[in-house]
């Protein structure tokens, strides 16, 4: 019965039986059978099913609200007992942006599994928030911030990992064909490449002399992998707003050219998020500490190679 109720929690969080079954490690048919048996046992309908989504009934919402708290306490008890062994073993689930997964996380996990062979990882590569979509231990997400930026309220603990400027840039070929924007407002007349998850999607923010320009750019290409946007910009497809470390080589060799150089851009941030837990599993505590330490080391080396100051707030002059 407890297994079925916990599975029910997964279904409500995901709004999908198949996704919940995948996370829980059972077949969709077994999950459907569990839900039917749970409803029969309780004598009440718990879920409303449509072709697109599953949502809780009034009774189902009550069960979710009450048991979700109990389940968290149960997990705390298990973690407290397991932590007495002080051993690194078990599974760690991480949701990460594609850029961080490729440039940092893959190397860090490769190092960590050599040091702790009893740990296994599940990595979900996504640029979107996963707080209520997946059950993960850690989430690494990208944000774009500027002076006075107010982060939205969250129940998660946030730890900043990396900060660097965002640079508006395009290929010389694009400038030769369409000209160079001199004011942020002129971006409305240009082809622009953007990520939904950064700077409010199609709203880019620039600062000059303490004044902010929020520009709703022309929507040409939308993607949530920064490297895809860079490749499109290199091919002359438009102006992209990208982290400096991602385009520094191309800026130096002239394949990309920075625009709006008299404006201070927003900051690109990669942040680590995790749930506040009274008893975080030892495996998660140890990996979190290792991740933060290694990212700091790798970021310091990258910034030194790029000539970026720390803390970072630069104007691009080339």
Image (cartoon, rainbow, N blue to C red):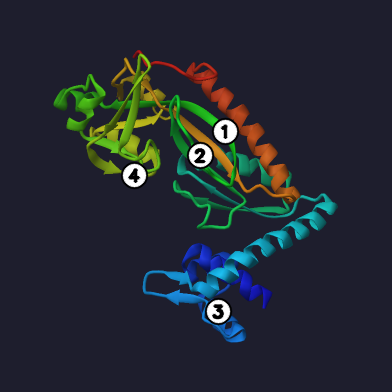
Where in the figure is residue 46, as x and y percent of width and height?
52, 77
Asked if the residue under mark 4 is in contact with the one under mark 1, i.e. CB atoms within 8 Å, the reply is: no
Report which residue position mark 2 lands on: 100
Q: Tag 2, which secondary structure?
A: helix
Q: Earlier in the sequence, mark 3 or mark 1?
A: 3
Look at the image and tell me in which quarter the C terminus lies.
top left
Report which residue position mark 3 lands on: 35
Asked if the residue under mark 4 is in contact with the one under mark 2, i.e. CB atoms within 8 Å, the reply is: no
Report which residue position mark 1 lands on: 161
Q: Nearer the viewer, mark 3 or mark 4?
A: 3
Where in the figure is residue 29, as x and y percent of width and height?
51, 79
- Calculate the distance from the C-alpha at mark 2 to the C-alpha at mark 3: 37 Å
Q: Earlier in the sequence, mark 1 or mark 4?
A: 1
Q: Nearer the viewer, residue 27 or 41?
A: 41
Look at the image and tell me in which quarter the N terminus lies.
bottom right
Report which residue position mark 4 lands on: 223
């Amino acid at each position: 019965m407890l297994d079925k109720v916990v599975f029910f929690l997964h279904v409500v969080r995901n709004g999908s039986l198949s996704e919940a079954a995948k996370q829980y490690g059972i077949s969709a048919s077994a999950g459907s059978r569990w839900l039917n048996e749970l409803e029969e046992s309780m004598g009440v309908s718990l879920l409303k099913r449509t072709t697109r989504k599953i949502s809780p009934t009034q009774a189902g919402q009550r069960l979710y609200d009450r048991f979700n708290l109990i389940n968290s306490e149960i997990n705390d008890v298990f973690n407290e007992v397991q932590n007495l062994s002080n051993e690194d073993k078990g599974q760690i689930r991480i949701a990460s942006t594609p850029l961080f997964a490729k440039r940092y996380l893959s190397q860090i996990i490769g190092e960590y599994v050599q040091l702790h062979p009893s740990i296994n990882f599940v990595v979900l590569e996504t640029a979107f928030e996963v707080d209520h979509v997946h059950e993960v231990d850690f989430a690494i997400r990208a944000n774009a911030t500027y002076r006075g930026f107010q982060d939205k309220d969250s129940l998660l603990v946030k730890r900043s990992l990396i900060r660097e400027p965002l640079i508006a840039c395009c290929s010389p070929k694009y400038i030769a064909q369409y000209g160079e924007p001199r004011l942020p407002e002129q971006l409305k007349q240009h082809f622009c490449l953007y990520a939904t998850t950064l700077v409010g999607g199609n709203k880019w923010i620039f600062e000059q002399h303490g004044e902010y320009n929020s520009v709703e750019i022309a929507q040409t290409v939308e993607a949530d992998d920064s490297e895809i946007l860079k490749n499109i910009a290199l091919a002359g497809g438009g102006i992209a707003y990208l982290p400096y470390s991602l385009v520094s080589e191309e800026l130096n060799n002239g394949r990309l050219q920075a625009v709006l150089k008299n404006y201070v851009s927003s900051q690109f941030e990669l942040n680590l998020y995790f749930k506040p837990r009274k008893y975080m599993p030892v495996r998660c505590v140890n990996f979190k500490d290792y991740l933060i330490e290694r990212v700091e080391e790798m970021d310091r080396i990258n910034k030194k190679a790029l000539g970026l100051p720390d803390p970072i707030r630069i104007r691009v002059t080339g």
